[in-house]
Structure formats: structure tokens, C-alpha cells
Image (cartoon, rainbow, N blue to C red):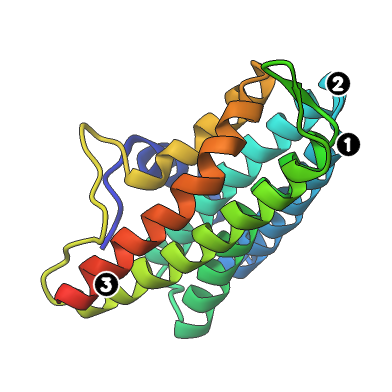
Amino acid sequence: MVGDSWTHKVARFCILPLVNTPVTPNHLTTLRLITGVVACSLFAIGTAEWNLYGGLMWLLSGFLDRADGELARVGGKTTPWGHQYDYFSDVFVTALFFIGIGIGLRNTTFWNVDLGLWTIVMGICATAGVIAAEILAEKIDQAQKDTGEKAYAGFSGFDFDDILFLFAPVVWLNLHPPFLIGASVGAPAFALLTWYRFKKL
């Protein structure tokens, strides 16, 4: 099913020149994976300048995540392997974000508390929660494939995972310390909620 969110529509328009070319969705997925890893690596440096560059790379990676799927659907190039490659790349990059900012925030002071290396531990907790939630959400989507329902539906022209585009401004505005603290608890809790929904199917 072709995505109807605003980000899908923009990506669909942008990939039209690539439809009848040797460029494949897997090429775009590989670029998405590379730019995502580069973005998280820049976040791990932890300075304002590199956070700026990391955020730009993060937005590019997120757009490529939309573009590869649109090229596959519009160009009739969908394959089971390509879907799995795209899926695992998405999970890996999203989870790696929290490791990246966790490393970048090492020895940060927040509310007059020196977080030390606990930010790395928080990043690992958030990462584990994201991976578990993503895997369970995929299982729910597969179980509901006939109905077309998603584990977490979007609204007003936005997909649920469009929230990932906000990660860049969160870092730019230096809001990632409280964001990481919240995610270290919220991501595992969200994974438990997704597991509960999966068990109810």
C-alpha cells in the first residue's frame, strides 16, 4: 500500500526521475543506513557544531527512508529481501540514535546533577526498548496485513514514525538530555505496551 502521509507524498514526487533508471530501492536504503550511522556518530561527539551537522544528516537519512519505499512501490521493485533490508536498517538507525546522544552527553550536568557516564546506560536502555518495540510492532503489522491496519496509526496526514524527524530539532535545541532520560524509561515501557497489544491479537 502506497503511503499517504505528507512525507511519503514528497518522497514519491522526488523519486519519480529515478523510476526507470538503474537506481534501486536497495541503493537508497544503503544510503539511508550510511547517513543514519554518520548522523549518530556526529551526535556522539557531543559538541553544538557536530550536533548541527548530525541533525542535518539525520533529516536526510529520514527522507531516504521514505524515498526507498516509494521507489519500490512506484517503480514496481518491491522484494521480500528489500523489505527486510529496509526494516532492519530502520530499526538499527533509530536505536543507534539513543546510543549516539548517550555518548555525546557523557559527563553532562542536568538540573545541577552530573550525569557522568549514566547517559550511556540510559542510551542503552532506550535502544533496547526501541528494538523490542519495533520488532513487536512489525509482528502486529504482519498479523493485520489483511486488514491494512498498523500497530500505531498516524493522524492528520502524518505517520506515527514521522516523529523521528523531530529528533534533529530536539538535539539542536539542546533538549536531548531530558529527552534521553525520558526515553530510557519510556522506550522500554512502550515496548511493554506493544507486547501487550501483540498478545491481545
* Residue matched to label 2: 49
Look at the image and tell me whether residue 16 can be seen.
no
Disc 2 residue type (three-letter)? Glu
Point out the image quarter for the N terminus.
Answer: bottom left
Residue 155 pos. (x, y %): 21, 37
Q: Residue furthest bottom?
A: 80
Badge 2: few (under 14), some or many (20 or more) residues near its Cα, within 10 Å? few
Left or right relative to 167: residue 76: left
**Disc 3 from disc 1: Cα separation:** 36 Å
Mark 1 residue element: helix
* Residue matched to label 1: 45
Relative to the observer, which residue lies in front, 176 or 10? 176
Mark 2 residue element: helix
Badge 3: few (under 14), some or many (20 or more) residues near its Cα, within 10 Å? many
Give the vertical position of 60 relative to 175 (above or below): below
Relative to the observer, which residue lies in front, 49 or 133? 133
